[in-house]
């Protein structure tokens, strides 16, 4: 790159009020290191405001200078497009990974639900078996209680009959 062209472009950027960080970013985009870019900015900030010997008196750039400026602008534009493509591809990769994570979470939830349902079914089968056993035992107990009740009724009737006979014999 032509150092004079870079210096003039940086000077114009400084004069236009562009922030140093933006200028550094632009210079790093065209292949200049960050430290070197900061040095170029400081060097151009310290140049007095008087017109340098290398500029033309009417401040119009020569056709060669215009070509160099246009070339530099094209390089910056191309670098910006590359950066945008990198950003887009990163966004696409992040979105793809996000979708994969969502799918994995759904699969884990499905497995969790399936295992939970299977455990509930096993528990339900076990509980049903226990309830059936308890129902049978309750039926047996109920039958025993009813048999005892009938027996006690018969004893009670027999005792009444005996008491009634005793009362009559007196």
Image: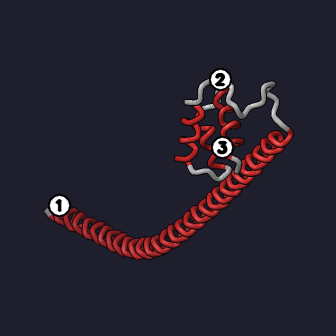
Residue linked to disc 2: 50
Evaluate whether residue 45 shows in this view.
yes
Specify which label sits upstream in the sequence, 3 or 2. 3
Q: Could you tell whether 121 is left or right of 78 in the image? A: left
When asked about the image quadrant of residue 19, the answer is top right
* 93 or 15: nearer the viewer: 15
Label number found at residue 42: none
Percent position (x, y) of residue 67?
83, 44
How far apart are the two marked residues, 1 and 2, measured between alpha carbons? 148 Å
| Residue 97: x %, y % from top left | 62, 61
Kindly indicate the quadrant of the structure image that contains residue 64: top right
| Residue depth check, mark 3 versus mark 1: number of the one nearer the observer | 3
Comes first in the chain, label 3 or label 1: 3
Q: Position of residue 145 (x, y in %)?
A: 32, 69
Q: Residue at x 83, y 37 (%)?
A: 62
Q: Residues within 10 Å of mark 3 (few under 14, many from 20)?
A: many
x and y percent of residue 129 in the render?
A: 44, 76
**Mark 3 to mark 1 CA distance (whole Å):** 128 Å
Q: Residue at 52%, 72% (x, y): give it.
A: 118
Q: Is residue 28 above or below residue 157?
A: above
Secondary structure beneath dot 2 equals loop
**Are discs 3 and 1 less than 8 Å apart at CB?**
no
Label placed on residue 26: 3
Neighbour class for label 2 at 10 Å: few (<14), some, many (≥20)? few
Mark 3 falls on what kind of element?
Answer: helix
The residue at which mark 1 appears reads as 167
Q: Outermost residue, front direction?
A: 53
């Amino acid at each position: 790159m032509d150092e004079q062209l870079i210096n003039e472009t940086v000077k114009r950027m400084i004069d236009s009020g562009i922030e140093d960080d933006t200028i550094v970013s632009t210079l790093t985009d065209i292949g200049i290191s960050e430290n070197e870019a900061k040095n170029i900015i400081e060097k151009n900030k310290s140049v007095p405001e008087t017109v340098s010997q290398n500029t033309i008196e009417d401040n119009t750039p020569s056709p060669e200078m215009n070509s160099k400026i246009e070339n530099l602008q094209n390089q910056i534009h191309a670098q910006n497009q590359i950066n945008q493509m990198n950003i887009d591809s990163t966004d696409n990769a992040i979105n793809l990974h996000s979708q994969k994570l969502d799918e994995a979470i759904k699969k884990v939830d499905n497995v969790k639900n399936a295992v939970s349902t299977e455990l509930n079914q096993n528990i339900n089968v076990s509980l049903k078996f226990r309830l059936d056993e308890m129902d049978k035992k309750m039926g047996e107990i109920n039958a025993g209680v009813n048999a005892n009740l009938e027996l006690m009724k018969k004893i009670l009737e027999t005792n009444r009959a005996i008491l009634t006979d005793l009362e009559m014999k007196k």
